[in-house]
Image: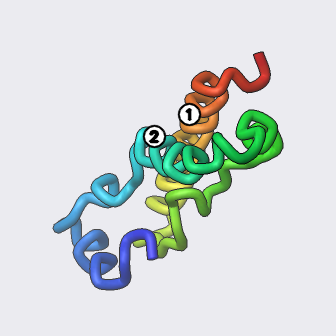
Amino acid sequence: QFFGEENIYSIQRGIKDPSDFIPKVGDITSRMEHIVSPLESKIDVISLLNHSLITPQCGFRNFNIPNPSMGEQIVKRLLEIQEKAAEEVREKYKIGF
């Protein structure tokens, strides 16, 4: 799970920072490249990526939110990271240009 149940208590009490568990844009783009790279010699990767989506499950996994107000902030941040990762993939592979 995103934070892991073992960390929820510490996050709720302010002992751990939830932002330490949020993936970076580079984590997501690196994972995409790792998946796509072996396919480049076998298929049209540009076409594949052009018809692919980066969803919240890409690098975010399932997660528990410590509380509702924090959950809203975290989800917003995750969606922003997702969009930036998608932009980087589009730029790298020149998709949609």
Check residue 84 in the rendering and tell me which mark sits there, or answer none: 1
Q: Nearer the viewer, residue 6 or 48?
A: 48
Q: How many marks?
A: 2
**Residue 19: image x %, image y %?**
33, 53
Decide if residue 72 is on the left or right side of residue 51: left
State the residue at coordinates (41%, 72%).
66
Decide if residue 42 is on the left or right side of residue 30: right
Check residue 25 in the rendering and tell me which mark sits there, or answer none: 2
Question: Which image quadrant is residue 9 in?
Answer: bottom left
Q: Nearer the viewer, residue 84 or 33?
A: 33
Q: Nearer the viewer, residue 29 or 64?
A: 29
**Residue 65: image x %, image y %?**
46, 70
- What is the CA distance from the residue labelled 1 to the residue labelled 2? 7 Å
Three-letter amino acid code at disc 2?
Answer: Val
Q: Up-down: is 89 above or below 67?
A: above
Secondary-structure class at tag 1: helix
Three-letter amino acid code at disc 1?
Answer: Lys
* Residue placed furthest toward the front: 41
Decide if residue 22 is on the left or right side of residue 31: left
Label 1–label 2 contact, CB within 8 A: yes
Check residue 60 in the rendering and tell me which mark sits there, or answer none: none
